[in-house]
Amino acid sequence: LTVDGARSVLLAVIASVSGAGCQVGLVGMPHLNLGAVTGLGGDLARIATVPEPGVDPVEVAGVLLDGMDLVVLDLAGAAVPPARTRVMMGRLRKQKSVLLITGGSWPGAHLRLVTEVVTYRHLPGADSADLATARPGVGRIGGMTLRLTVADRGARRVVGEIEMRTSGYGA
């Protein structure tokens, strides 16, 4: 599975998996907001991080697959050769783990998920929930609408929108 675009869905997946009691490994993601993961219900005790994986992040992810239910690998813009992805896919089938790729090219991925922010929802301190009429510097972002595009290897695509709203302060 590859995920690109807005990080909200990635954070929600990590939170959901760790919050359900499963083990998650994060490779090459030193700036991921783990506070947001806990805010979404994630369990930091079930998340292992390798923020700086060195010269071969794919191998580090492969090692983590042996003990994790989900491994998230940020390729930092790199493209992994097809021969290397086939080896990792074979390893995945044996482990019954999920490898989620972000930030690069992974040929042969079963699914590709692209997310983009369509609109933001504004929370008052202003008179309106509409960003167009909100005063700059006043209020908070109270949610957003995301457009998700999912494509399989056969290039079949499904597009949908989800609305995410805050449940904390000011909601």
Image (tube, grey):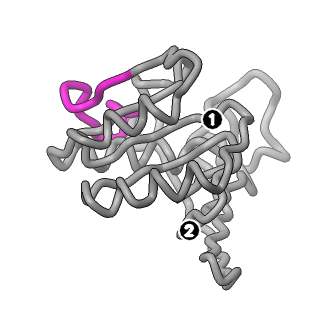
Residue ID for mark 1: 75
Residue 109 percent location from the top left of the image: 57, 63
Residue nearest the observer in this picture, 27 or 35: 27
Q: Residue at x 36, y 40 (%)?
A: 40
Residue ID for mark 2: 111
Q: Residue at x 67, y 40 (%)?
A: 103
User: Can residue 128 be seen here?
Assistant: no
Left or right: 82 in relation to 164: right
Other residues around mark 2 within 10 Å, as few (<14) / some (14–19) / many (≥20): some
User: Can residue 89 be seen here?
Assistant: yes
- Helix, strand or loop under label 1: loop
Q: Quadrant of residue 37?
A: top left
> How far apart are the alpha carbons under marks 2 and 1?
17 Å
The residue sitting at the left extreme is 21
Is 39 within the magenta? yes
Other residues around mark 1 within 10 Å, as few (<14) / some (14–19) / many (≥20): many
Part of the protein shown in magenta: 37-49
- Helix, strand or loop under label 2: strand
